[in-house]
Image (spheres, rainbow, N blue to C red):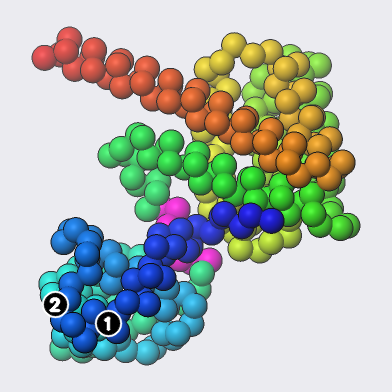
Amino acid sequence: MTHDISIVNMELETLGSYMAKSAEMKNNLQIPLRPRGRLHSVVSSVLENRILNGELKVGERLESESAIAREFGVSTRAVREAIQELEVKGLVQRRHGERTEVVRDDINSYLDALAVTVRQQFHSNSDYLLQLMAVRRMIESEALEILTNKKDVQMSKVDDAVKGMKKARDDGDFPGFVNADASFHLALVHATDNQILMRIYDNFSGLINDVIHVTSRIPIKSLADAYQEHAEIYELICNRDMTGAVDRIRTQIDNSADYLRQAIEKSNMKQANKEDENG
């Protein structure tokens, strides 16, 4: 099984080699071969990982800024910027005249803060939505791998969502179909019973639901075709066809990402035209 989804560790995947070389860098007094603007991000990510995995516990004090700077071979300014990032995420707290204190080890609270950060990014960069779609693709692909390899999976809520889409299709109820569509994808992740995966998806589910509502209005696709697409994914899961199910969900999300891109471009053009008229 390919475990390609872990939001918490997404930005830490490249740090293994850095950590392996840290002792050598300190001995040689060398700065890591990274752009200067990213040095504080490296420090922040490593310290964040130490907090989340329990190596640094709540109430514990970080080393002094100068000590951390020596460990990573960076300036104290980079350390201050790294600690500021951690403070914004609510993982540490700084007090004047005292060393920085770890204040959170609750991964759920951390993910809550992360979801807020992502939502705030949308206000300044609409393309951030496309990055959300990439995250969604990884989460749901992983969920289907789990479901097709797991025994005694409880799929009742997935089944309810499929029935809801079928009824909405028969009634010509577009809003009802979109709501059942969103419920289908949420239920898939919850059926894994993977608490971390569920929590991550729950934090982004509101954003994902918004995306589903937007993208469902772009393509010229009948409710019958949309229902059939989801019904086939459900059947592939029930038949434990991991490759087929994962391929189908990835294609569906990739198409949604393309529809979303169209919606963003259309919105940007409309905004530009409005600015030209007012200018």
Q: Is 158 on the left-hand or right-hand side of 219?
A: right
Local crowd size for mark 1, using a 10 Å CA cut-off: few (<14), some (14–19), many (≥20): few
Task: Please state, as top left, top right, bottom left or bottom right, where the N terminus lies in the image.
Answer: bottom right
- Residue 188 in the image: x percent, y percent? 72, 46
For the point 56% across and 15% down, the residue is: 219
Q: Amino acid at mark 2?
A: Thr
The magenta stretch spans residue 114: yes
Q: Which mark is residue 98?
A: none
Instruction: State the image coordinates of residue 65 (x, y, percent, origin top left).
Output: 19, 83
Q: Point out residue 214 in the picture as x, y percentages from the top left corner.
A: 51, 26
Coordinates of residue 224 in the picture (x, y in percent): 75, 16
Q: Nearer the viewer, mark 1 or mark 2?
A: 1
Q: Secondary structure at mark 2?
A: helix
Give the extent of the magenta segment: 108-116
Q: Residue at x 62, y 30 (%)?
A: 252
Viewer-nearest residue: 17 or 205? 17
Find residue 100 and report its image quarter. bottom left
Q: Is residue 200 visible?
A: yes
Which mark is drawn over residue 24?
A: 1
Q: CA distance from mark 1 to mark 2?
A: 20 Å
Judge the density around disc 2: few (<14), some (14-19), many (≥20) Cα neighbours within 10 Å: some
Q: Main secondary structure of the magenta part?
A: helix
Q: Which residue is mark 2?
A: 76
